[in-house]
Amino acid sequence: MPSFDELRPVLTDNDKAQEFFIKKGVICPPTVCPRCTRPIAYTPNQRNTVRCRAAACRFIIPSKCDKCDGPMAEYHDDTGELRSKVCQNSSCHWTWRVKGTGYECSVLKGSVLQNVKIRKDQVLWLAYLWLLKVPARTASHITGVSEGTVGRWYRHFRRMVIEMVLQADKEDYMLGGPGRIVEGDEGKFGRRKYNRGRCVNADWVFGMVERGGERKLALIVIPDRKANTLLPLIMSFVRPGTQINTDKHGGYNKIKDLEGYNYEHRTLCHKYEFVAQDGTHTQTIKGNWRVLKKNVPESQREGSNLQEYLYECMWRRKHAKHLWKSFIEGLACLRYRPEDIDRLWEMREDREESWSPEESSVDDSLDANSSVSDDDSLSEPSSDYMVI
Ligand SMILES: [Zn+2]
Ligand SMILES: [Zn+2]
């Protein structure tokens, strides 16, 4: 991570932050006028918009809303002459009149920063603090952004990172290869009722970690520990020819027989040994469980919430050396805005489940149509996890 001092200009100055976002491709002002197809260029201005200066553009009737790309309704006068067109999107209502204005839209249109209510430098600062795992309350003190808003932004950042994982090349998140060792193990992420007492609920997570180097991780919530669940995950995350170490759990028995994968499977019995006589051990993944459990708050250990945190862990591990750079680059590649990510997530998951109250409030840091149904909840790890 760059130091605060290095980033100070962009973390504390709105204009510099916007410049930074443009330079990094997170904000991409259009280079061609969508209305008249002439080239246009963004020059910093008070209104923070990009405009088409072609005179002819004013006489072209827009086919869709300049602001939001929404559908437009036509309004005619008594003689049937077209007078205006109005965006039908209830949160927009942008109006075009016959006397004509050339194309003009916010420079933020279509970027993850569209409709964002806090300053752009604050977005960057919060991202910086989130990457450093600064708790929301502390971040609120540091930045002056309300704690609720910080919490929602933290959640958005997590969503963005998850999208980065889901949109990444499958290969990017694969582990092992010939001569490499991957340890696999199942861990139980328990939840205590009202944060005390004994565990009342727990989800199994299947974890795989590659030994040495980056210690790349794959972590997936699993509905059960049967071979039919575990083996497909191994095949989708572990490269052929890898040595796989596990305990003697029956679900792993067929690892050696997976055709075309050529895995070498070694086992040990946790009950009796830490390291088998041939040196086989799974201490790396065991050590990871401890760290991971510290990173997933107990209130979030269910269904989709748990999987979200696990994806975040995978991303953080993979990019540990360049968190800031990778995050900003990832933002530039994101095809979705946070609102879309919320919607996307809802489409992916269909099971209702509890949502922790502290996160369920309506989002006011973004615009109305993002007022997120936060009851997005998940389910068993659906077919989704294979997408990676
Ligand atoms: Zn134009
Ligand atoms: Zn509109």
Image (cartoon, rainbow, N blue to C red):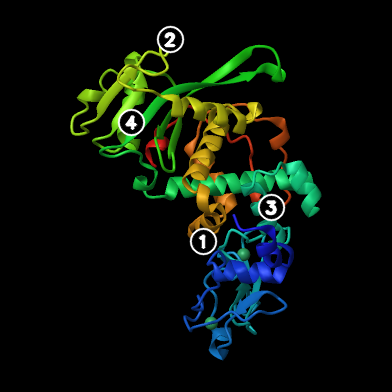
Q: Position of residue 331 (x, y in %)?
A: 53, 57
For badge 2, the amino acid type reads Lys
Q: Earlier in the sequence, mark 1 or mark 2?
A: 2
Q: Position of residue 364 (x, y in %)?
A: 73, 49
- Which quarter of the figure has residue 113? bottom right
Q: Nearer the viewer, residue 250 or 55?
A: 250
Are there few (<14), some (14-19), or many (20+) residues within 10 Å of tag 1? some
Residue designated by label 3: 126
Q: Earlier in the sequence, mark 2 or mark 3?
A: 3
Horizontal relation, residue 133 to residue 307: left or right: right
For badge 4, the amino acid type reads Ile
Q: Are marks 4 and 3 in contact (CB under 8 Å)?
A: no
Q: Nearer the viewer, residue 25 or 274?
A: 274
Residue designated by label 4: 234
Residue 332, numbered circle: 1
Q: Quadrant location of the N terminus?
A: bottom right
Q: Quadrant of ligand 2?
A: bottom right
Residue 271, numbered circle: 2
For badge 3, the amino acid type reads Leu
Q: Between tags 1 and 2, which lies in front? A: 2
